[in-house]
Image: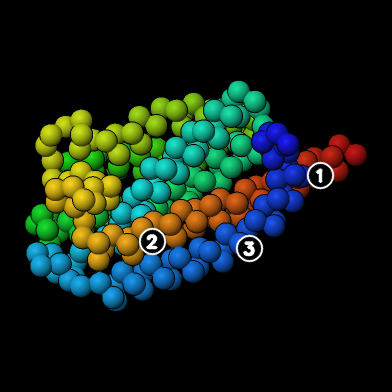
Amino acid sequence: MSVWEYANPKRFMQVSARVLPVVVGLTVVSLVTGLIWGFFFTPDDFRQGSTVKIIFLHVPTAMMAINAWVMMLVASLIWLIRRHHVSALAAKAAAPVGLTFTLIALVTGALWGQPMWGTWWAWDPRLTAFLILALFYLGYIALWQAVDDPDTAADLTAVLCMVGSVFAVLSRYAVKFWNQGLHQDSTILKVGEKDPIDVAYYVPLVVCILGFVLLFVALVLMRTRTEIRARRLSALLAQERLA
């Protein structure tokens, strides 16, 4: 069976209908477990106190804000190369979800940064790139709404997605590109290295990350199914007007 069979709207609707309840169930279990464990059963940090527990919201949403754009880029490239409508609709469906994660990450980052850095915002390379990424999300959503023809909108938003990918990369690797700024580099993959994240936070954080990944998948599946139904409805209405 070819993977491209799932690009058929009918096939996608059949498979996603079976997969979605499982993904939703796993999402609820992992998010409830991770957030309760993280916020109520982890110790306060000796420097940051209870403020450090924002990590269980901030890190997963920041990761998914970037990865959502990467998913949109892949789906957009598939649309440009293969002209599969499901991929274009999946990219469109992912944008509001990615924007929501981006805004949550910005807000929780400000709440975490104020007591640690003494300021709600700094024009740090990573923070600035992240803010620009949020603006690209808004532009992407607005462009879909502004163009009436769906295929033309998919083409234009795919190009915008490729341009915005620069800032998605900078949001992830700005700390490595510029050795300045307040934001620290990632410590999630540094267990066992110098200055790693403590295992008391690491395990529930991984559970939270898994939960947000599953939440993203569930929401994108739901929204893609809605977009497919909306396109079918538009086609039926157009046929009725012609008749």
Q: CA distance from mark 3 to mark 2?
A: 19 Å
**In x, y percent, where is residue 216?**
49, 53
Quadrant occupied by the N terminus: top right
Disc on the earlier residue, 3 or 2 = 3
Q: Amino acid at mark 1?
A: Leu
Residue picked out by circle 3: 21
**In x, y percent, where is residue 235?**
78, 41
The quarter of the displayed image where residue 113 is located: bottom left
Residue picked out by circle 2: 208
Q: Is residue 241 visible?
A: no
Disc on the earlier residue, 1 or 3 = 3
Q: Nearer the viewer, mark 1 or mark 3?
A: 3
Mark 3, residues whose alpha carbon is within 10 Å: few (<14), some, or many (≥20)?
Answer: few
Q: Nearer the viewer, mark 1 or mark 2?
A: 2
Q: CA distance from mark 1 to mark 2?
A: 42 Å
Above or below: residue 137 compared with residue 57: above
Q: CA distance from mark 1 to mark 3?
A: 29 Å
61, 124: nearer the viewer: 61
139, 217: nearer the viewer: 217
Quadrant occupied by the C terminus: top right
Residue picked out by circle 1: 236
Mark 2, residues whose alpha carbon is within 10 Å: few (<14), some, or many (≥20)?
Answer: many
